[in-house]
Image (cartoon, grey):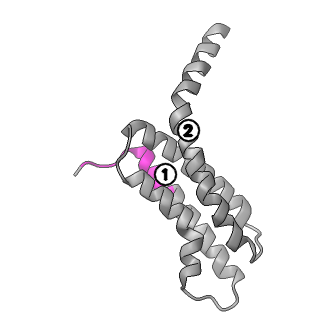
């Protein structure tokens, strides 16, 4: 069995931390906590992006790099919104994180190589 790339492991670790932050905030904010479908709703964005990292599609290097960057961006957003949260946020935040994470990953995947080529060409002009 081939070991996954380091960026895949970093992305999976970031998504695991995201899910842990969201679950910890959910447990803290709910008075009688219970394991139900609401917990699944809160962690769904991270499960979908984790599946996108593990299921082979497209170019392996680009998928791993852009998935890692997307996971790290999700970690920043998750930490920011869930550190001091209200109960209503648990209903709306996954609804926005799921499509936003997928769209960010798609933009990074398809526009990333062009952006890096343009950026390297522009920085060579400064030398």
In this rendering, is residue 81 above or below 36?
above
In this orientation, does residue 127 appear? no
Badge 2: residue crowd in 10 Å (few <14, some 14–19, many ≥20): many
Prevalent SS, magenta region: helix
Label disc, if present, on residue 108 of the rendered structure: 2
Mark 1 vs mark 2: which is more N-terminal?
1
Q: Quadrant of residue 122?
A: top right
Judging from the image, what secondary structure is the residue with disc 2 in?
A: helix
| Left or right: 94 as drawn, with respect to 40 | right
Of residues 112 and 78, the one drawn nearer to the viewer in this rendering: 112
Count of numbered circles in the view: 2
In the image, farthest residue toward the bottom? 32
Name the spot of residue 27 as percent of width and height, x first.
64, 81
Q: Position of residue 46 (x, y in %)?
A: 53, 62
Disc 1 element: helix
Q: Quadrant of the C terminus?
A: top right
Q: Is residue 22 above or below residue 27?
A: above
Q: CA distance from mark 1 to mark 2?
A: 14 Å
Taking the spot 62% from the left edge, 49% from the top edge, the residue there is 73
Q: Which residue: 63% across, 52% down?
A: 100
Please state if 35 lies on the left or on the right of 88 as rendered.
left
Q: Residues within 10 Å of mark 1 (few under 14, many from 20)?
A: many
Which residue lies under the disc numbered 1?
Answer: 11
Which region is colored magenta?
2-13
* Residue visible at 51% across and 38% down in the picture: 109
Spot the residue most to the left.
1
For the question of whether residue 1 can be seen, the reply is yes
**Front-most of 87 and 4?**
87
- The percent coordinates of residue 102 (x first, y second) are 55, 51
Residue 4 in the magenta stretch? The answer is: yes
Residue at 47 percent across and 40 percent down: it is: 65
């Amino acid at each position: 069995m081939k070991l996954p790339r380091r960026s895949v492991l970093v992305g999976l670790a970031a998504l695991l931390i995201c899910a842990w932050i969201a679950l910890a905030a959910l447990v803290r904010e709910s008075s009688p906590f219970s394991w139900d479908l609401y917990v699944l709703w809160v962690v769904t964005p991270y499960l979908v992006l984790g599946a996108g990292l593990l299921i082979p599609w497209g170019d392996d290097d680009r998928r791993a790099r852009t998935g890692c960057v997307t996971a790290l961006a999700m970690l920043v957003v998750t930490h920011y919104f869930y550190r001091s949260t209200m109960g209503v946020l648990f209903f709306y935040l996954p609804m926005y994180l799921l499509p936003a994470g997928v769209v960010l990953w798609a933009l990074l995947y398809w526009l990333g190589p062009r952006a890096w080529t343009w950026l390297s060409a522009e920085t060579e002009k400064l030398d």
